[in-house]
Every structure is written in structure tokens, then in C-alpha cells.
Amino acid sequence: MASVLKSLSLIADPTRVRLLLLLKQEELSVAELQEVLSLPQSNISAQLAKLKAAGLVSDRRSGKNRLYQLDEPSAKDQPAHEHFIALLEAAGMELREVKKDSDALQVVLRKRAQTAQAYFDALAGKFGRHYIPGRSWKGLGETLLKLMPPLVIADLGAGEGTLSQLLAQRAKKVIAVDNSEKMVSYGAELAQKHGFANLEYRLGDIESPPIPPLNVDLVFLSQALHHAQNPEKALKAAFTILKPGGRIVVLDLLKHQFEKARDLYADVWLGFSESDLHDMLGRAGFKKIETSVVHRESKSPHFQTILALAEKENRLTPSGHWSGS
């Protein structure tokens, strides 16, 4: 345990406060800390070295990684340690980044759990790679669609509406929104051709969709959010049009460095990290947020697909009216 004065000087730095609060919750590697804090690896390693030298942090080797944790005090140091932790937590309350760190940590821990199941993921990944009579992703998708309850669904950034037409097979109503007149016209023609009376195409922007508030049960944003000028505004708009208890599904690209996507696909954003998407959904008002990486393309640039699910809480006032915005 470091001296009181040295300990106080160490937690005068906000980054070290954030590090210590994270390591108080969980044993973490430098890579995991880097993902949570969104800071350079060199910065994190330098700060960890100072904390370790002061006796506040210890580490151990685990395979190829070195895991760091808050050092456990001896019995005689326990009272001083408790006072230090109280001071550390008080310092953390002054840092707005600490709440975001906590949310990002949960994302990292979920990814760690997924990695631990790599063996089973590998088995599941063989689905569709080998021919088995009667087994296909299309058949599985059609089965899941049949199990979906009849909902009012908004497909924002629908394009020509391939997903909208699949959903219309089961949905009560599907509202497909796109900002391209040609896409809307083409999609409407296909809907009419295939007899989807419950599928309506509307011209509009995903940041301000032409749908009244509290009007839909489910919102889809499938590979649309990275085209938005303001993704957070689009998520807040989705929150507004959802009924209480409604859900949102976001399928998008995981953050990448393929700059050519801006010219090739008119992408405004080069994908989103899990923690960024989790944070944006939270600020938009959503609860019960889950994120995961569900696909990685085998060909360069190896785009990965991120899936996010979230819910609009059903909060009722004593008079029976919904209290959300």
C-alpha cells in the first residue's frame, strides 16, 4: 500500500481514477482497458506502471495476456485501504466519463464470455458451409418469421425494401422509409406486384421519419445508421415513434478503417464500436440494451456486422398515461 500522500497524488489524475475504478470491478488486460477507455495503449501502460510501482495495482500472466487488478491490502493496511477506496469513489463521482466506462466494461465482459464459448461458436459456424438436404438459412429465416407476432414495424432506411417485404409476410403493418424517391417508387411497385397490402413506403429521412409518435411496435435500422449525418438523432427519432414497451433492432457495421467506403457506398460513418452504439442508444432513452458482433466477412476488408437490441420502457403514471418523451 502506497503512503497516503503518494496515493492522493496518484488519484489527482482523472485517467488513473478511471483505471482504478475499473480494476476495482474486474481483472482486465491492457487491450480490454484500451477498448473501455478509448485511450492509446501507450498511455494506459504508462499509467498502469505507475500504479503498480505504488503498490495499488498487481498483475498476473494469463496465456498471452497480462491481467491487472486492484491490489489486495494486508490486514494491517485494510483500514487505510478502505479510506482510499472511499476517496477514489468520491473522485469518480466528479468524472462524467465514469458512467460511460461502466457501460463499456459490460460490453467488454460480454465479449469475453462470447470468446470463452469459441468452441461452440465454431461448431455453430459450420451451419451453411456443408451441404445438408433441407437445411438452409432461408428456411430458418422463414421459420422465425412465422413465429413473430403481428406487429406494426418501421423499417428506417429501407432502400428497395427487401427486409420490409420479408417482414410484411407476418407483420400487421410495415412502414418502409427511405430518402430516395426512386427507391420508394421501386419498393412500392414491388409491394403492389407481390400483393403486400400491409406494406407502405414513405419518402423521408431516418433522422425525422414521417411517422407519428408512439405509432410502432418495432423499429429496424438495417445497415442504415452509418448513412445518417447524425446517428444519435436517428436513434432518438426511433425512440419517439415507438410505443411504450416497443423495441429497436440495429444491424450495422462494426467500426472499421476502410476509408474507401465513403466513396464506394456513400457511407458517412465508418461503422460503430459496441460501446459507442450502446452509449448512443442509452442517451436516446432506450433500456435493456444488448450488443454483439454477429458476422465477419471472409473477404477483405473483412467487414463485421454488429447487432444491437434495446427497449423503450413502459412507464405509466398513476393516471394511466405513459410518462416517456
Image (cartoon, rainbow, N blue to C red):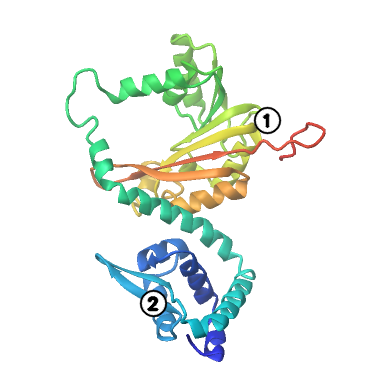
The percent coordinates of residue 97 (x first, y second) are 57, 65
Q: Are marks 2 and 1 in contact (CB under 8 Å)?
A: no
Question: Could you give the CA–CA distance between mark 2 and mark 1, rounded to whole angstroms?
Answer: 51 Å
* Furthest residue toward front: 75
Front residue of 265 and 104 = 104
Classify mark 2: helix, strand or loop. strand
Which residue occupies 51% across, 84% down? 77
Find residue 130 and report its image quarter. Answer: top left
From the viewer's perspective, is 322 left or right of 61?
Answer: right
Q: Quadrant of the C terminus?
A: top right
The nearer-to-camera label among 2 and 1 is 2
Kind of residue sitting beneath label 2: Ser
Front residue of 86 and 281 = 86
Find residue 291 and report its image quarter. Answer: top left
Kind of residue sitting beneath label 1: Leu
Instruction: Work out whether 175 lies above or below 197.
Output: below
* Furthest residue toward right: 319
From the viewer's perspective, is 129 left or right of 305?
Answer: left
Classify mark 1: helix, strand or loop. loop
Residue on which disc 2 sits: 58
The percent coordinates of residue 177 (x first, y second) are 54, 28
Crowdedness of circle 1 by 10 Å Cα count: few (<14), some, many (20+)?
some
Q: Upstream in the sequence, badge 2 or badge 1?
A: 2
Find residue 206 and report its image quarter. Answer: top right
Residue on which disc 1 sits: 214
